[in-house]
Each structure stands twice: as C-alpha cells, then as structure tokens.
Image: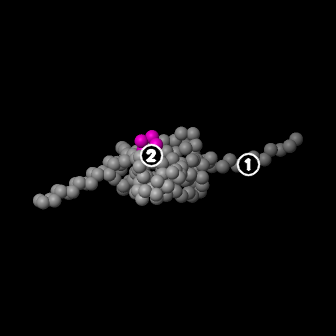
C-alpha cells in the first residue's frame, strides 16, 4: 500500500523545540489541529480512518485530484459550564488538512466516505488486475 502522509519536518521541529502541542499557524492558514489517521488494506480496498472528534460532517471535505486524496475541514468546539459561582468556557478551533498519495490501483471513481461517532472512514476500492491474455504467434 502506498498511502503516504505528507510530512512537514519544520512543523515537527517547531513543536519539539518550542514544546508546542500543535505548532503555530501553518502555510495556507491551516491551523494546528492535525487529526490522527489509520490506514489498512485488504484484497478489495484501501481504508483510511481519520479521527475527527467534535467535527461535524458538514465541516469536512474529501477531495481527489490526480493521484492525491485530501481530507480538510475545520474543528469548531466550545464547552461551557455554568454553575452558581463558577463559569468555565473552553474553545477549540482550527482548520486541518491531510493529504495522501493514492496507489496506482485505487479506483478513484468509486471512492466512498462516511462519518460516524467522530471517525471519518474513506474506502478506496482496488481496480481488479487484468488477467494476462495469451496471444498466439502465427
């Protein structure tokens, strides 16, 4: 399987050097939220599972362009606790984008995606290999 996550070494260096949880704003105004991704494959398809807790389905975009699959969107989360003598408000906002190189045998016309319980599952069916046809030499 050749699903490749694009790696930004400078962002990782910045996180470690400055001890930042998500780094600063990235290029193209993409925020510091980077969802975790699991990939697997079987005989019929490749599977990409993206953890997107607190992200609504309408705030997610899955795009295929040439040999690249891109998952992008925005996380908007606000938690408020109001009690008699206590008020707490936490907000988590951030745009995200993850890109993957598609394998040569991925059927890009039949890709499907569903989001359930904060997990986006993308299924990339495999194109069946063509059988070898024996040509008779005359």
Q: 14 and 76: which one is in front? A: 14
Find out whether residue 4 is within the magenta segment: no
Q: Which residue is mark 1?
A: 132
> As drawn, is 77 to the left or to the right of 123?
left
Q: In percent of the image, x 36 and y 44: which residue is there?
A: 58
Labels 2 and 1 touching (C-beta < 8 A): no
Residue segment shown in magenta = 26-30
Q: Where 63 falls versus 118 (above or below)?
A: above
N-terminal-most mark, 2 or 1 = 2
Q: Which residue is mark 2?
A: 26
Q: Name the secondary structure under disc 1.
A: loop
Image coordinates of residue 32 in percent, x first then y, are: 41, 50
| Disc number lying in front (2 or 1) | 2
Image coordinates of residue 23 in percent, x first then y, are: 42, 52
Q: In percent of the image, x 41 and y 54: which residue is there?
A: 22
Q: In percent of the image, x 51 and y 47: which residue is there?
A: 99
């Amino acid at each position: 399987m050749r699903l490749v996550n694009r790696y930004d070494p400078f962002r990782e260096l910045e996180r470690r050097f400055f001890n930042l949880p998500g780094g600063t704003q990235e290029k193209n105004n993409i925020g510091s939220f980077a969802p975790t991704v699991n990939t697997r494959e079987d005989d019929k398809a490749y599977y990409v599972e993206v953890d997107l807790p607190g992200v609504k389905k309408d705030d997610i975009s899955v795009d295929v362009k040439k040999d690249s699959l891109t998952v992008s969107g925005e996380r908007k989360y606000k938690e408020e606790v109001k009690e008699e003598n206590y008020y707490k408000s936490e907000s988590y906002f951030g745009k995200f984008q993850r890109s993957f190189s598609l394998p040569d045998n991925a059927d890009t016309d039949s890709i499907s995606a569903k989001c359930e319980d904060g997990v986006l599952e993308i299924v990339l069916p495999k194109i069946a290999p063509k059988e070898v046809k024996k040509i008779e030499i005359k």
